[in-house]
Amino acid sequence: MSLDSLQNLFVTELKDIYNAEKQLVTALPRIAKAASSPELADAITKHLKETEGHVARLEQIFQSLGVPIRGKKCKGMEGLLEEGKEIMEEEGQENVIDAALISAAQRVEHYEMAAYGCLRTYAQILGHSDAARLLGQTLKEEEAADEKLNQLAEGGINQAAAAVGSGENK
């Protein structure tokens, strides 16, 4: 598809985030399993359910636009998930790995928030009010997931990770 109109850009970006969300549906169970903190694993598992809802919303938007439901390989998400996979394969202290998983997950959330923010704006400009509402709903869920990750990090996981390495870096 040529990027010769905002509508074409909108559809192209929808396909990209659709593929990103599909990649996440596959990756999130592995990330939850890699977490040693029960609270972190639970937050990731809950976000998996939301992510499945994001996929369904995107499919609803594709249908409303009369566009075939298919993704366009999202290389950005692929790279972010590859970095997360590397963290899961590392040897180390559980608390430090959890802190690293939160960092990787927040990078994913920020990537998604940027995408959904742009898509919602495009939808508003193009007069796709239902799509704008659905995209805004997903954006709010991504922001809430990011905030939950912040709370887990600041609520003890980062401090526990810091305690593990205190005195070892001298």
Image (tube, rainbow, N blue to C red):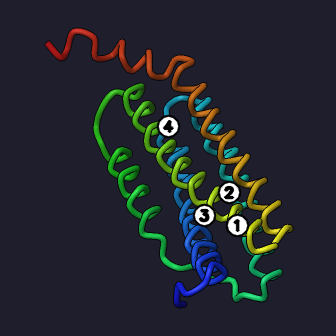
Q: CB atoms at circles 3 and 2 under 8 Å apart?
A: yes
Residue visible at 38% across and 61% down in the picture: 79
Element type at mark 1: helix
Proximity of marks 2 and 1: CB atoms separated by less than 8 Å: yes
Rendering coords of residue 106 (x, y %): 51, 42
Which image quarter: residue 168?
top left
Rendered-image quadrant of the N terminus: bottom right
Query: Image height check: is 102 above or below 14?
Result: above
Dot 2 crowding, Cα within 10 Å, few <14, some 14–19, many 20+: many
Between tags 1 and 4, which lies in front? 1
Read off the residue under disc 4: 35
N-terminal-most mark, 1 or 4: 4
Asked which secondary structure carries label 4, the reply is loop
Q: Which residue is mark 2?
A: 51
Disc 3 from disc 2: Cα separation: 6 Å
Q: The residue under label 2 is which amino acid type? A: Thr
Q: Nearer the viewer, mark 4 or mark 2?
A: 2
